[in-house]
Image (spheres, coloured by chain):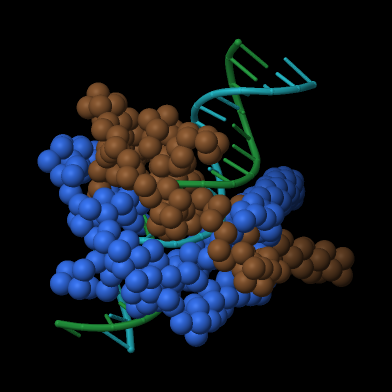
Chain colours: A brown, B blue, C green, D cyan
DNA sequence: TTCGGCTTGCGCAATTACTGA
DNA sequence: GTCAGTAATTGCGCAAGCCGA
């Protein structure tokens, strides 16, 4: 588990920011502020129509991914509450072509652009992997918690057992010491005759 | 912990999607596909210059949020690795005004729009809360794991203790039975006289 | 009832871990 | 052993729901 928010780094980020706040190369920024590129890339372009068959493929991938998570959840039957907190889950972002304005000019080498089918397939595969990984993590956490509770109970039982055995040992020792004392007295009594 | 990916719900989502894949009301879609609005809202507008004081406020909030996480991490000194995996963390998205093209016309009642300062402040507060909450969850998981290991060790010690006590009880019982046999023999021997 | 913080599912992107050629 | 491609992991932001004051 890695945390990038160490004090030094966060302070450095904070300090460095003043010089790089206009960096247009950040992919996360371009994802959230695509309009920064409008001056360069905002020229009118033909909206790329996505073939229906590709939509079907994406739908199938999404569906199978969700089915995987659902089945694995039910397979292990963990006590997750299944309340539909996210009521309006929206898959349309995967089925619609990305906006035309995020297209880069042809000369730009950025790998596959955000509207390419390869990019969408890659993203969707990763989304499935992410869901799978997080589900696995949830299971691991649940197992650890259950194991801790079980160990706690076991510990309690063992302590009771130890208590019982200790009492037994004490009783036996006490009994023996009494017997020993008695015998000593008897021997003393006998020896006086 | 709630999971909304039950089989039924995911299938329903899948089925429902066919009728709503073009829903432009999805906020998540609008976040990732802001250009869908260009035809409506892409008219030339004056770029809203953000006052420097607001940038300062946002910077302070971000900085304090990161500081909180950092300090709480160091305060409890958990063995997190501090490798800077995200090398180019970019805060500029919070410090720059949002793109003009995401502005909604005044008539639209959507609550605070994505470019309003109130929205950005709300988002930034939530981001801080999210970081805090996830950090707390990480700590909880770490504690649970450590507790499980500790309980396991404790369990082992207790089992050894029980083993020792059981042997002791056995030895004492055996000793007593021998003594009892001896005494019976003695009594028998004495009674014969 | 409302409001603000807290949780949590999710997608994105970067990075790491694996695996087969 | 190397390298390319893919899966897995992880930090992050967004949004929705939850909860207590």
Foreground of the two, A187 or B42: B42
Residue B68: name its quadrant: bottom right
Residue A184: name its quadrant: bottom right
**Count of picture labels:** 0
Foreground of the two, B57 or A167: B57
Q: Position of residue B30 (x, y in %)?
A: 29, 55
Q: Position of residue B18 (x, y in %)?
A: 15, 37
User: Residue at image x 45%, y 58%?
Assistant: A36
User: Residue at image x 29%, y 37%?
Assistant: A46
Position of residue B4 in the picture relative to residue B109 (left or right): right
User: Residue at image x 54%, y 77%?
Assistant: B59
Quadrant of the drawing holding the C terminus of chain A = bottom right
Position of residue B21 in the picture relative to residue B73 (left or right): left
Q: Position of residue A102 (x, y in %)?
A: 40, 46
Residue A129, visible in the rendered structure: no
* Whether residue A120 is situated above or below residue B126 in the rendered picture: above
Residue A133, visible in the rendered structure: yes
User: Residue at image x 53%, y 39%?
Assistant: A108
């Amino acid at each position: 588990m890695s945390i990038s928010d160490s004090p030094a780094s966060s302070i450095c980020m904070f300090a460095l920011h003043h010089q790089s706040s206009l960096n247009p190369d950040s992919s996360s920024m371009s994802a959230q502020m695509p309009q920064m590129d409008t001056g360069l890339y905002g020229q009118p372009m033909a909206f790329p129509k996505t073939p229906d068959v590709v939509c079907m493929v994406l739908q199938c991938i999404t569906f199978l991914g969700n089915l995987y998570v659902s089945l694995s959840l039910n397979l292990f039957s963990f006590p997750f509450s299944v309340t539909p907190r996210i009521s309006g889950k929206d898959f349309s972002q995967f089925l619609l072509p990305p906006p035309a304005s995020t297209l880069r000019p042809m000369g730009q080498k950025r790998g596959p652009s955000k509207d390419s089918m390869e990019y969408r397939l890659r993203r969707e595969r990763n989304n499935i992997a992410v869901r799978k990984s997080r589900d696995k993590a949830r299971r691991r956490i649940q197992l650890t918690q259950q194991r801790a509770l079980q160990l706690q109970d076991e510990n309690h039982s063992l302590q009771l057992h130890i208590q019982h055995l200790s009492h037994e040992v004490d009783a036996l020792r006490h009994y023996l010491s009494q017997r020993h004392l008695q015998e000593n007295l008897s021997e003393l009594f006998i020896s006086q005759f």
